[in-house]
Image: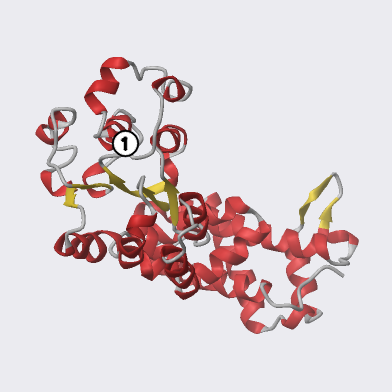
Amino acid sequence: MKILYVEDELKKNISGIIQLFNKYLGEDIVLKLEELMNDVYSGDEEIKDVIEQCDFIEVAYSFPDAIKKVKLKPELFSLFIVDCNLSEQPYLVRDLREIAPEYDEDKENRYRGREGEYLLNILSANKQIEDLKDKFYFLSAYSASSNIISLIDNGTITKNNYIEKGSSEGNRFLKRKVIEKNKNLLVKLTNKPYIDVLEKIDSNLKSSFINLIINQNNETRIRENCQIIRMISEKIYTKVAKDNKVPSNIFVDRYPDQINIRPFIYWINNKRKFNANSIINNGMLAIQSICSDVIHGGIKGYQPTIDTVNYLVYALKDIILWYSQDKIKKK
């Protein structure tokens, strides 16, 4: 999950971008942005590319591009920070209609200079996007217009979702109470070492792992969390097996992309492959046996708890870091 930052005058707002997002940008990106701020030849695309070197923020600096992002992949974003007036970058209605066929001349007249409000209306019509009052914030010199007043009336957003652009008080609120309190972003930040490893194995594992961490203390998701833990661990084992010379019994005969988990665990640990030890052995065995029992309903007597899931999550994290060693590489 990322922040979608929509601003049609990136260069003028570099200092504000650094102030809002420095926790996620990192020192190297901040230094690059400061250089671009003082470079008379730097443009919006270059600034966008530098910001997006971090994995927490995606940028749109034109209205057509912003529409495309909120229409095609809104689920990628846990936070929308949007300049209300996006008219600084020229656009034509006919260009907008390629992605938003419903955008006619009437809408052009209503939303000209308040293009950001149209983005909110797109999201509010998407039934899969919930809690917009906690996710969508305007940066604006104006208050809400008639375009979205009904969304305020029905509680979709409130007047507090309008942050006065350039206001130090507004920026402090946005940074401390919104950006730095966003649960999805905090999970990504605090678990970045594990996420980086998983993304190199399979890009889909990143979202699965984030979903697991966000919900690991949810009592109603114990079985689902065990499924995710087992799936991620088995993806790691399969990658190790494919990249190294393993005994023939580790791969399933008729399914060359599937491994036999117990023989793999034996091969790794009893042969002390790649610095495996009791930490890795016990973690692998616990995940394999407990997750299988939970998933298939095979546990009698004492039942798994949130503590069980947390134990397995920590075991998984050890396995992820173990996999990241240089010693585990293609032979």
In the image, is residue 176 above or below residue 64? below
Q: Nearest the camera: 103 or 40?
A: 40
Q: Position of residue 136 (x, y in %)?
A: 27, 45
- Residue at point 11% right, 44% down? 159
Q: Position of residue 296 (x, y in %)?
A: 55, 50
In the image, is residue 40 above or below residue 142? below
How would you rate the neighbour count of disc 1 (Cα within 10 Å): few for under 14, some for 14-19, many for 20 or more?
A: some
Quadrant including the C terminus: bottom right
- For mark 1, give the secondary structure: loop
Q: Is residue 248 left or right of residue 312?
A: right
In the image, is residue 87 above or below residue 41? above
- Residue at point 17% right, 59% down? 167
Q: Is residue 284 left or right of residue 69?
A: right
Does residue 277 appear in this view?
yes
Q: Residue furthest front?
A: 40
Q: Is residue 140 left or right of residue 286?
A: left
Q: Position of residue 184 (x, y in %)?
A: 38, 57
Does residue 218 appear in this view?
no
Q: Nearest the camera: 43 or 180?
A: 43
Quadrant in the rendering for residue 194: bottom right
Q: Which residue in the protein does label 1 denote?
A: 87
- Residue at point 19% right, 37% down? 156
> Which residue type carries mark 1?
Ser
In the image, is residue 222 above or below residue 268? above
- Residue at point 65% right, 54% down? 202
The total number of labels drawn is 1
Q: Nearest the camera: 78 or 171?
A: 171
Q: Position of residue 43 (x, y in %)?
A: 48, 52
